Amino acid sequence: MIELFNLKKRYHDGTYALKGITIRLPKRVTAVIGRNGAGKTTMIRILSTQLEPTSGTATVGGYDILNDTDAIRAHTSSIPQEASPIGFLTPIEHIRIYLLARGMSFKEANAEGSRALKDLELWNAKDTPTDVLSGGMKRKLFVAMALAANADTVFLDEPTTGLDPLSRFEVWAAIKELNGNVILTTHYMDEAQQLADEVVLVDQGKVLERGSVGSLLERFKGKVRVESSDPKPKARMQYKVGTTRISYVKKSMINEFISMGCTVRPITLDDLFIVHGVDLQEEGEGGEGEW
Amino acid sequence: MNIKFIASMTYSYGISAIARGPSYLIASLTLPLSLLFMVSILSGGALIVYAIIGGFIALLAANSLSSAGDAAFWRIQLRMQDLFVTTRITRIDYMLALTLSYFVGSLPGIALYIVIGLIYHIFTFETFIVLGCLMALVTIATSSISFIVAGMVKHVRNIWGIASILSVVMTLLPPTFYPYTELPPAALYALSISPVTPAAILAQNAFGLVPFNITLVYEMVAILLLETIVFFSLARHFTVWREK
């Protein structure tokens, strides 16, 4: 169980990354979703004791992030966003060093590290310097480290960013194998849908919405998303994202919108952002499946 | 203190690194050996013993100072420090691991200098112990400076330049490759801001290269100990660990 109590973070340049979040995260796998700069990483870094909050506090497994950092570090593991391995060290060396830092014995570290590398199909590369591994394999190495740690709570900050689809599936499978609670941040809505028991939607340092994927998408029940770049059906469109106009209509009306040249798409978690008025084009980055 | 972590990191990042990337080893030896050669030629061999003894200190100090690059790179670029912050190790464990990794990287150079020193018959048991103590203190002090600086930089690119400047200012300007008696007293004390200066002065006195100056020796022992304690304390408190 993780609880946040009016958690705020203001950086030295005056930017508020978190604007007083109070929330309980009781589920086994929670996905924190949001655009870049929404506050996801700040939240994870504070909860995993990498970063101190400006005010407010939080508890992880009953331990306070301000006063019980040693206990939290003993019971959690955290994989930072955009972490890269040390070039000429091998995967087995990375895992061994990490697990020893967590307090394991050499024997345990070797056994758990080997098991995690095998589970993530990295065993054949265990003695290869990581600077010659693919980006996907490097990312999987960090997930293997989290897997090997056997922590009660695992924080994964964008664990599959940059991975090819097959590697993503492998990482998803590994995350499902994790024993403890998992808090992950992601840009990928399909990832949240695949993995999370609960989704927390954040934007500009605030929680916009939370719930199971099913409950969050309840409002769209029986509807589809229709999109058009053509201004003609403008009057019937509710939202504008860049040059694209979007509306949510009953499935019985699909043919009518198709005849107007609209594209019909199934509902995903992306649509939560649209109905909350989050300007997806503002980000100016991201690609397929990415905000 | 997490000895297992420190030992594993030292083995992987120090010993294995030498085997996998010997160019680093050669690079770390290039400057001291070049200076040894130059000093030897320019002084007609008269100052070669200064350069051998100074080379020990300069090699260790330069290696320790260059660890600032990795400390900053691991924190800012690789985010590896974030990974370790959330484990059970302390910043002292982390600093020691990186420092010892670099120290191990200095060992082949030290061995080479010992061979040269033996050829020139400069060692006695006592001077060897004194040199060992001085090298230990210089390593602690300069590594601490590395971590303080690495924690202050915002962009990785800056650290390479800063580390180079520090390396030159703190290892070449001090009287490592020449007699400290050539320096005016004011310059001697000004250069003592670098822990290498008192170490070099003490080494030159211990090895009998200059007339023994007991007052200066006491002063320099005090300065070196004080600098080691102060720089280590500053690193302990100001090295970025859990960020604010």
Image (cartoon, rainbow, N blue to C red):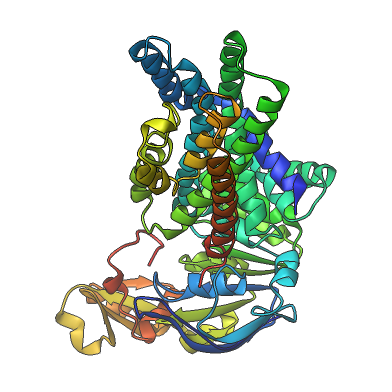
Please indicate whether residue A105 sits to the left or right of residue B61 in the image: right
* Image location (x, y in percent) of residue B164: 37, 39
Instruction: Look at the image and tell me in which quarter the C terminus of chain A lies.
Output: bottom left
* Image location (x, y in percent) of residue A15: 36, 79
Q: A284 or A55, which is in the foreground?
A: A55
Q: A59 or B51, which is in the foreground?
A: B51
Q: Is residue B205 visible?
A: yes
Find residue A76 and report its image quarter: bottom right
Please indicate whether residue B48 sits to the left or right of residue B128 in the image: left
* Image location (x, y in percent) of residue B16: 63, 29
Instruction: Look at the image and tell me in which quarter the N terminus of chain A lies.
Output: bottom right
Q: B142 or B45, which is in the foreground?
A: B45
Give above or below for A177 relative to B158: below
Q: Residue at x 48, y 56 (%)?
A: B148
Give above or below for A80 relative to B98: below
Give above or below for A212 relative to A90: below
Q: Residue at x 61, y 13 (%)?
A: B115
* Image location (x, y in percent) of residue A136: 51, 45
Q: Is residue A85 visible?
A: no
Please indicate whether residue A126 sits to the left or right of residue A255 in the image: right
Find residue B92 and report its image quarter: bottom right
Give above or below for B131 relative to B117: below
